[in-house]
């Protein structure tokens, strides 16, 4: 018998996730800095980031900032459970996962702003700091992506639930008290 599931991630959240992941892979590994594809994919990611920021206020419950904002109390409780080896199952993002998501989104914004400054602001022509900031942000995002992926696998094993699959299907196993 299959465990009961509930719809958690709406199509917009799933499309945002796939789009940002695709842009990251394309721009980090396959396009050259300054090429048209690199630039337009960066603008595409910034557009999705803007949509996601707005969706955090008007979207479905699990997409709303209020549902998973990583407050000190939420982070403290989650970290305490992690350190004790206790499962911390909650629908949506865990507090630490939400913190990493916020860091990734901030880094994407930094990439967008620094990329725009390098390409479009004539007063910065020849300045090194936008390129340095852009490279630092890209490498920081790569590190956060690896952490995000590792955490998803580790939590999946710990909770005995395929969390990456839930981002594809939009469904999660229902809590035992959910009907």
Image (tube, rainbow, N blue to C red):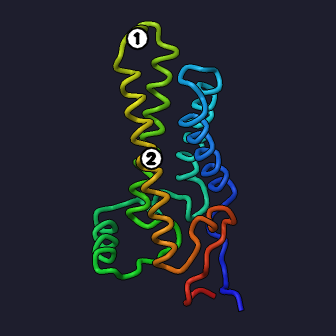
Q: Position of residue 119 (x, y in %)?
A: 51, 16
Q: Position of residue 6 (x, y in %)?
A: 65, 76
Residue 90 located left or right of residue 21: left
Image height of 156 relative to 37, above or below? below
66 or 84, which is in the foreground?
84
Say which label, 2 or 1, has the lower sequence index. 2
| Element carrying mark 2 | helix
Residue 31 located left or right of residue 159: right
Q: Position of residue 35 (x, y in %)?
A: 60, 20
- Packing grade of label 1 (10 A; few <14, some 14-19, many >=20) is few
Residue 24 located left or right of residue 142: right
Residue at the farthest bottom position: 1
Task: Say which residue appears at 42% left-offset and 49% top-offset.
Answer: 144
Total label count? 2
Task: Say which residue appears at 36% left-offset and 25% top-offset.
Answer: 132
Image height of 149 relative to 177, above or below? above
Quarter of the figure that contains the N terminus: bottom right
Quarter of the figure that contains the C terminus: bottom right
Residue at the farthest front position: 29
Instruction: Find the distance from the CA under tag 2 to the CA under tag 1.
Output: 26 Å
Task: Say which residue appears at 62% left-offset and 62% top-offset.
Answer: 167
- Packing grade of label 2 (10 A; few <14, some 14-19, many >=20) is many
Q: Position of residue 98 (x, y in %)?
A: 43, 59
Residue receiving disc 2: 104
146 or 115, which is in the foreground?
146
Q: Hey, which quadrant is residue 162 in on the image? A: bottom right
Label 1 near label 2: C-beta < 8 Å?
A: no
Residue receiving disc 1: 124
Image height of 93 relative to 146, above or below? below
């Amino acid at each position: 018998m299959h465990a009961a599931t509930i719809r958690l991630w709406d199509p917009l959240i799933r499309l945002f996730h796939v789009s940002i992941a695709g842009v990251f892979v394309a721009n980090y590994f396959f396009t050259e800095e300054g090429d048209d594809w690199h630039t337009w994919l960066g603008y595409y990611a910034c557009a999705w980031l803007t949509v996601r920021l707005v969706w955090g206020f008007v979207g479905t419950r699990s997409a709303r900032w209020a549902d998973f904002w990583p407050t000190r109390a939420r982070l403290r409780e989650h970290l305490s459970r992690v350190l004790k080896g206790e499962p911390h199952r909650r629908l949506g993002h865990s507090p630490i996962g939400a913190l990493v998501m916020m860091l990734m989104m901030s880094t994407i914004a930094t990439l967008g702003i620094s990329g725009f400054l390098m390409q479009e602001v004539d007063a910065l022509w020849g300045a090194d700091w936008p390129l340095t900031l852009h490279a630092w942000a890209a490498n920081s995002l790569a590190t956060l992506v690896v952490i995000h992926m590792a955490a998803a696998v580790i939590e999946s094993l710990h909770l005995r639930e395929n969390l990456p699959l839930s981002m594809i299907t939009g469904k999660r196993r229902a809590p035992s008290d959910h009907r």
